[in-house]
Image (cartoon, helix red, strand yellow):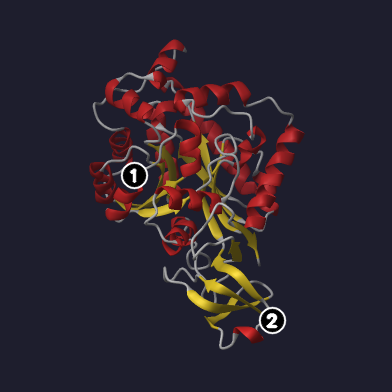
Amino acid sequence: MKMNRIAAKYVYTVNSRTPILNGFVEYADDGVILSVGVCPDISKEKVFLDGAIVPGFVNAHCHVELSYLKGMFRKGTGMAGFIDQINELRDFKTPQEKMADISAAMDSLWNQGVQAMADISNCADTFPLKKASPMYTRTFLEVFGTEPEDCDAVMESVTRLQAQARSYGLDAAPTPHACYTMSPQLVKAASAAGLQSGFLSYHSEESEQEEEMIGRGSGPMWENRVKAGMSTPPVTGQSSLEYFVDRLLEVHPAPFPENILLVHECSMTVAGARLVKAVMEHPYIALCPLSNIFIHNTLPPVPMMRSEGLNICIGTDSLSSNDELSMVGEMCCLQEHFPELTLGELLEWACLGGARFLGKDNVIGTIEPGKRPGLVLIDGLVAGRLSRKSSSRRIC
């Protein structure tokens, strides 16, 4: 077995938020980590990089099938305007063009160092590419449907899609999209199907428009559904997160032992965070800050999430709501807006947080002997922190 050795100014194992200074990593040809440590003499290292060696990233939330929509969306429209644009643009390219764009996005993610991904699918477009990719993916088959009488038909359709995904050897199961695109019956049914798999991903409290819709029966998203002649969700006087938890409790009593990912949470309150911790044994929050800024120029309450001890992951969302799919870009955005965040903590979220959500932290997420996490170089650091010039590339 051939041993490879690489060294750098910083090595972040992510077992600790503090890097190894002038560290090295030894690994086998198949990427399995053999050893990690401090270089006795950097002048004798054959490969010494001016940057940080880190584990492969885990993109905790992506819609890679929407990659063909890059550059097509207006920014700052809010959620109601964003949904309108999706409905207008979803089918403007040929299947061949869509597949080429998806393939390019998958290659880019892999080359920048994404080792695993929690990806959303509404159709089968991504399945053959995921099967061929060295990247691990768990596919969340997202469902929509505002009319209660359509619930059974929607679930039958997504069950067929799940069988198709599994025929490619993919880990895949249904998941609910969000409170504003589903009837209460469908939120419950899709949640039940997802919980059976042990994993759930849900767009939660992405904007104040969502809170207006559920809490007060008003706002642009509510008005859009009324104008379209669609059924509206019940007005609860509560947060949309509480509404979702109530649907979960119709599936089975708390506590929930499944891994549940709440995506965005821009409007989460302390009460919401504590509710989540009270009813879910393994809750995770997926931060997608560049998407939040793109759509409605806001960010989640990251300091509160940290103080409440929530498990945090990082995702890129899609190229319909982002200029690029870059994990380093997402981390840099978070660092700029929350300067108290260190690179070590951001990497914990970008690598280990997502690995734990996917149940793959025994293999990926940290650099330690016996694991095969992938190795990534981040360059463009300034005084050990990310800069707008920072980028990443895969080492192995």
Residue furthest toward the right? Answer: 96
Residue at mark 1: 301
User: Which residue shows up at 31% across the image and 23% down it?
Assistant: 234
Quarter containing the N terminus? bottom right
Q: Which of the 4 quarters of the picture holds residue 48?
A: bottom right
In front: 338, or 394?
338
In front: 72, or 66?
72
Q: Residue 257: x, y in percent? A: 34, 54
Q: Which of the 4 quarters of the picture holds residue 159?
A: top right
Q: Is residue 366 above or below residue 279?
A: below
User: Which residue shows up at 61% across the image and 59% down it?
Assistant: 113
Please rate how many residues cluster around mark 2, counting C-alpha atoms within 10 Å: few if below 14, some from 14 to 19, many from 20: few
Please rate how many residues cluster around mark 1, counting C-alpha atoms within 10 Å: few if below 14, some from 14 to 19, many from 20: some
Q: Residue 318: x, y in percent? A: 57, 39
Closer mark to the observer between disc 2 and disc 1 = 2
In front: 53, or 135?
53
371 sits left or right of 353 in the view: right
Q: Earlier in the sequence, mark 2 or mark 1?
A: 2
Q: Residue 270: x, y in percent? A: 24, 44
Amino acid type, callout 1? Pro
Q: Is residue 369 visible?
A: no
Report how far apart the C-alphas of labels 2 and 1 lie in the structure: 44 Å
Q: Residue 4: x, y in percent? A: 67, 79
109 sits left or right of 84 in the view: right
Number of numbered markers: 2
Amino acid type, callout 2? Lys
Residue at mark 2: 46
* Label 2 element class: loop
* Label 1 element class: loop
**Circles 2 and 1 in contact, beta carbons < 8 Å:** no
